[in-house]
């Protein structure tokens, strides 16, 4: 774990161990340069505690960049609850309340929200011990799940990427592979089908793809089948799916999906540039959840303002694609440069 922290440029990490459930709890607070940090709580099983901490630190950094590019007055952080396996409802509640206590000790330097493995109902539980939890269920005064708006943002991002490579934003006849049909992937499939795209889906849970096959008549591929002829690859499951080993197998023109930390490492941005694949940087295209949670709950935005923020994801990506072309850098680098310029300028430029 020492190695993970010494490789990281974040502000602070809070680490604890819960003996009752055998779980490690991590909060990685990366940066408060643009405002108090925010980022979801991920609950899953990892090979080692160090892997869980690494995930938390990298995801927290991505949140800093996400907030900066989206123009939200927030910093970046992330929580990981690394569980040994499925927990009983009582143990899960116990762990969430312990996490809430940890969040509360940070006195608002960090607020959390839902992420992979947690839901609005879990945020309701956290709220019993901390006010710093976005995304509670609407019945409890929250703005509910961020996933549908994340899907809207990804849809705008896919349209912007297709416009960049085709000269037209129309998705009619464009072949999109949606890998992972969960809370974000499923509504994304609906929007793509409605826009006339040809959609192929994959998921490790067969019932999820079967339901979409019945509802929309979409094609189905095996979960890790990425070497099929498609126009757009939309990773909407886990990250680390695009790297030196997978890039030579890809037969798409665009990568644009919801998953956080899609690239195995930063140099994969250049690999994609060399391969002629247009990459929509994850921390830009998947900002819809942050726009939803921070917009409604942190900034008191109306639905119109949130919708404008979601459309802005497409506009920002179009600018990043043009910047990358004119500067001769990868789209990942162009997006990082935009985030770093906003971070260097400080809070006022992000409002
Ligand atoms: P989810 O857990 O609801 O859905 C993930 C889906 O991927 C599940 O259906 C799962 O069975 C499937 N899956 C897992 N491994 C797979 C594999 N190897 N191949 C194909 N499918 C696989 O999660 P959610 O909320 O839809 O998030 C998806 C991604 O988007 C995550 O990486 C998350 O970090 C990211 N994201 C989510 C946001 C949100 O508001 N929910 C916001 C920003 C990013
Ligand atoms: N976990 C989601 C993300 O990665 C949504 C989220 C945004 C949660 C901001 C908390 C704060 O964007």
Image: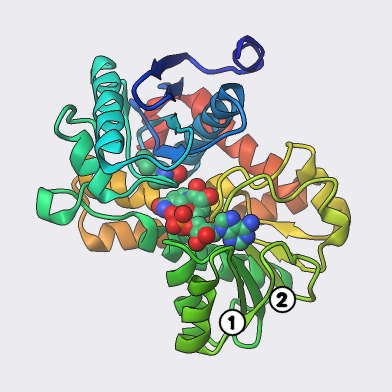
Disc 1 residue crowd, few under 14, some 14–19, many 20+, Cα 10 Å: some
Give the answer, above or below, for where 106 lies relative to 229: above
Which of 349 and 159 lies nearest the eye of the viewer? 159
Quadrant containing the C terminus in the rendered view: top left
Quadrant containing the N terminus in the rendered view: top right
Which of 122 and 22 lies nearest the eye of the viewer? 22
Real-space Cα distance between discs 2 and 1? Answer: 9 Å
Q: Is the CB of mark 1 within 8 Å of ligand 1?
A: no
Label at residue 277: none
| Quarter, ligand 2 | top left
Write the residue at 11% across / 55% down.
Answer: 139
Q: Quadrant of residue 36?
A: top left
Q: Are marks 2 and 1 in contact (CB under 8 Å)?
A: yes
Give the answer, above or below, for where 289 lies relative to 214: above
Q: Position of residue 8 (x, y in %)?
A: 61, 18
Give the number of callouts.
Answer: 2
Label at residue 166: 2
């Amino acid at each position: 774990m020492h190695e993970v922290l010494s490789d990281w440029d974040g502000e602070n990490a809070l680490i604890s161990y819960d003996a009752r459930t055998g779980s490690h709890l991590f909060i990685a607070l990366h940066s408060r340069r643009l405002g108090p940090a925010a980022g979801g709580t991920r609950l899953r099983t990892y090979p080692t505690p160090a892997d869980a901490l690494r995930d938390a630190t990298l995801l927290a950094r991505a949140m800093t960049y996400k907030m900066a590019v989206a123009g939200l007055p927030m910093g970046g952080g992330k929580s990981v609850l690394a569980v040994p396996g499925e927990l009983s409802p009582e143990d899960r509640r116990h762990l969430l309340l312990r996490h809430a206590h940890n969040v509360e000790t940070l006195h608002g330097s960090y607020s959390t929200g839902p992420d992979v493995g947690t839901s609005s109902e879990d945020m309701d539980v956290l709220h019993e011990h901390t006010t710093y939890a976005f995304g509670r269920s609407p019945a409890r005064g929250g703005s509910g799940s961020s996933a549908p708006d994340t899907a809207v943002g990804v849809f705008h991002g896919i349209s912007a990427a297709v416009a960049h490579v085709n000269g037209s934003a129309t998705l009619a006849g464009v072949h999109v592979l949606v890998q992972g049909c969960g809370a974000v992937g499923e509504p994304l499939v609906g929007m793509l089908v409605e826009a006339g795209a040809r959609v192929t889906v994959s998921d490790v849970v067969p019932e999820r793809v079967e339901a979409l096959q019945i509802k929309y008549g979409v094609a189905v591929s095996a979960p890790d089948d990425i070497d099929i002829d498609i126009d757009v690859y939309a990773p909407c499951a886990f990250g680390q799916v695009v790297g030196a080993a997978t890039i030579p197998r890809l037969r798409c023109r665009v990568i644009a999906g919801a998953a956080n930390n899609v690239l195995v490492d930063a140099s994969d941005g250049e690999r994609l540039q060399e391969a002629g694949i247009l990459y929509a940087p994850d921390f830009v295209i998947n900002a819809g959840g942050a726009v939803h949670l921070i917009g409604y709950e942190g900034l008191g935005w109306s639905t119109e303002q949130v919708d404008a923020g979601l459309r802005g994801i497409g506009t920002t990506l179009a600018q990043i694609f043009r910047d990358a072309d004119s500067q001769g850098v990868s789209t990942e680098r162009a997006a990082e440069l935009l985030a770093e310029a906003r971070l260097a300028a400080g809070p006022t430029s992000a409002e």
